[in-house]
Image: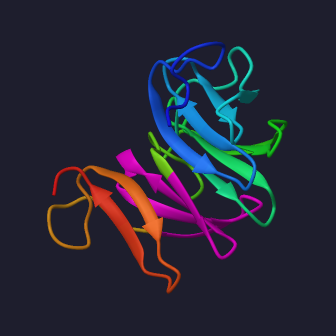
């Protein structure tokens, strides 16, 4: 099965993927959009109008609230959409203070918390589902527990946080 190989939903540079019970979402950094495909691989939603997304990368779907969280590395922010693609709100902005990002790359949702890989600030920031900042952790370094080139993030059902660091 191949998504986005041809037609109106043809992908150029797919980066992230997230799945709801109805839609497979794929972010495309070159096209500056997120595309949603149904179970038959048909394009059913396109997210991001002209200028809205600069560099969409990691994406995550909240099954409870039925919302899609899209990391926009170029705008140093997270945009949140309804399942059908309506823009709901965004948070972040460039900086190093709590709640700000410096080239975020990925996002993961577990148990009502949003975990954002704040790549060039070498940390993970944790928010609630409404963008309320909860806590950060991590710093730059080359020892266990520190980050050098953090890219991916996942959280187990038990609450263990896993970070993929491209330098290690």
Residue 75 sits in quarter: top right
Against 89, is 54 above or below? Answer: above
Residue visible at 25% across and 66% down in the picture: 146
Judge from the rendering whether residue 115 lies leftward or rightward of residue 69; answer left or right: left
Assign the magenta stretch its main secondary structure. strand
Using the image as rendered, state which of residue 35 and residue 92 is in the foreground.
Answer: 35
Q: Can residue 106 be found in the magenta stretch?
A: no
Residue 120 sits in quarter: top left
The number of callouts visible is 0
Against 13, is 71 above or below? Answer: below
Judge from the rendering whether residue 86 lies leftward or rightward of residue 166; answer left or right: right
> Is residue 97 in view from this perspective?
no
Q: Position of residue 94 (x, y in %)?
A: 53, 39
* Colour scheme employed for the rendering of this structure: rainbow
Toward the bottom, the furthest residue is 158
Q: Position of residue 38 (x, y in %)?
A: 71, 38
Residue visible at 15% across and 62% down in the picture: 142
Q: Position of residue 91 (x, y in %)?
A: 69, 46
Residue visible at 43% across and 80% down in the picture: 160
Residue visible at 53% across and 81% down in the picture: 157
Residue 10 sits in quarter: top right
- The quarter of the image holding the C terminus is bottom left
For the record, the magenta segment spans 107-136
Q: Can residue 118 be found in the magenta stretch?
A: yes
Judge from the rendering whether residue 6 lies leftward or rightward of residue 151; answer left or right: right
> Is residue 109 in view from this perspective?
yes
């Amino acid at each position: 099965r191949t998504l986005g190989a041809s037609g109106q939903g043809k992908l150029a540079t797919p980066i992230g993927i997230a799945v709801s019970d109805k839609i497979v979402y794929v972010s495309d950094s070159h096209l500056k959009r997120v595309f949603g495909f149904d179970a038959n691989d048909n394009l059913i939603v396109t997210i991001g109008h002209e200028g809205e997304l600069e560099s969409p990368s990691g994406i995550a779907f909240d099954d409870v609230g039925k919302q899609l969280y899209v990391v926009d590395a170029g705008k140093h922010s997270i945009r949140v959409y309804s399942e059908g693609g309506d823009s709901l709100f965004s948070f972040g902005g460039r900086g190093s203070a709590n709640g700000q990002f410096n080239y975020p790359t990925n996002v993961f949702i577990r148990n009502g918390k949003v975990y954002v890989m704040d790549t060039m600030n070498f940390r993970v920031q944790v928010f609630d589902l409404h963008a309320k900042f909860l806590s950060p952790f991590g710093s730059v370094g080359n020892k266990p527990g520190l980050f050098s080139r953090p890219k991916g993030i996942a959280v187990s059902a038990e609450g263990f946080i896993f970070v993929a660091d491209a330098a290690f």
